[in-house]
Amino acid sequence: MSVPLPVSGAWRPGDPPGQRRFVSFATDRSFVLEGGGMLGDITVAYETWGELNARADNALLVCHALTGDSHAAGPLVEGHPTPGWWDGLIGPGRAIDTDRYFVVCANVLGGCQGTTGPSSPRPATSDAPGRPYGSAFPVVSIRDMVRAQVVVANELGVRRWLSVIGGSMGGMQALEWGVMFPERVASLVPIATAAAASAQQIAWWSTGRRIIRLDPGWNGGDYYDAAPGEGPTAGLATARMVAQVTFRTDDVFTDRFGREVVEPLDGFSLWQRFEVERYLEYQGAKLARRFDANSYLAMSKAMDLHDLGRGRSGVAQALSRIGVPTLNMGIKSDSLYPPYQQREIHELLDAQGTESRYVEIDSPHGHDAFLIDLDQVGDALTEFLDKVEKDVVST
């Protein structure tokens, strides 16, 4: 007998903290969001690896993608439902070498793994203290996420990151760091991302949000009191199934699954499944066990709102604020964030005289290649960080 999926896979206060550390802010006055909403008593969950040196100039900020969290490295242990999402890159002797660098990763604002988000309890000053925000959680942007990360940097004594690194939504954060706080970064590594969300990207993510919205268990966003199996897990799982198709490629699906079937085709029915369907169902249920539907809505909306040029006279003008070495990585087979978007960032930076390099990962795995083809990502990172570190030390 299958176990019902939890209403939410969010981490809650009182759960085992694992390797998380926490910082709180906005306790005496509200944190005003870019879109006009406000939040108070904010908590940010983060993790660190390595040691900050005496000059405090060896710190790297690693920014996670949509369904990532602060657990970028380390095993599956109590409090962390999955191993580190970049575990093959972060650690002693690896491309992001924790014997050399002080590495930080924070769960973003609006997330569900320790940082204030829709599943978090409302502050004591609210009209429903202790109850999850649910539908009352405001819309957050990538810029709001970065401003919350500044609090983490200040808490740790990091005045300037040696580099800010991230893929997909993490790359959006890296770019915003360079535009919003150019004096606090020494280099940037945006991977498989864009300067502004395209119409097709908005189309894909908004489709996923609509699927969740149509799940009766979503209940307008206020579902946390429901019994296991009665939350919006079907909507979240289906949204993940759609997204998973955009993360990979036709070649990968064909090579792995072909036309293999689960139930024999010795008489047709609507719900006989091909193996690729079972794979997508597994990925959907897997996410539903560790993530929160409202956070999926909030964070995918932040990705759609991402536009470096908003309020800054356009993308080119915004990028003119970036004057530090930048390594732009694209993925040859990425159909969700196609490599032309990363090349455009590189070309705009190069045209304005900013030191910029473009590297393209040759992989069949599509958008997910930055999480899979770690040798190629790692080789480019190692070469880039070595040079940046030498330049910083010599100044």
Image (tube, helix red, strand yellow):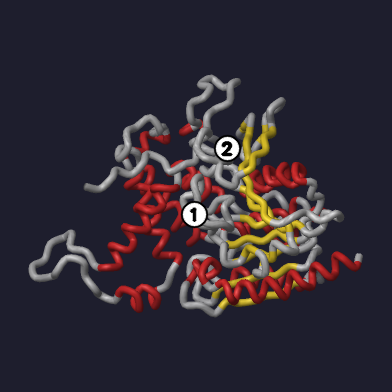
Q: Secondary structure at mark 1?
A: loop
Residue 119 percent coordinates (x, y): 49, 36
- Above/below status of 236 relative to 30: below
- Kindly identify the residue that appears in the image at 28 percent across and 45 percent down: 3
* CB atoms of marks 2 and 1 within 8 Å: no
Can see residue 309? no
N-term-proximal mark, 2 vs 1: 1
At label 1, the amino acid type is Leu
Q: Nearer the viewer, residue 228 or 90?
A: 90
- Above/below status of 34 relative to 259: above
- Kindly identify the residue that appears in the image at 54 percent across and 27 percent down: 122
Location of residue 384 by image quarter: bottom right
* Horizontal side, residue 243 vs residue 303: left or right: left
At label 2, the amino acid type is Thr
Q: Which mark is residue 76?
A: 1
Q: Which mark is residue 155?
A: none
* Horizontal side, residue 288 vs residue 148: left or right: left
Residue 263 percent coordinates (x, y): 17, 65
- Kindly identify the residue that appears in the image at 60 percent across and 43 percent down: 109
Q: Which mark is residue 116?
A: 2
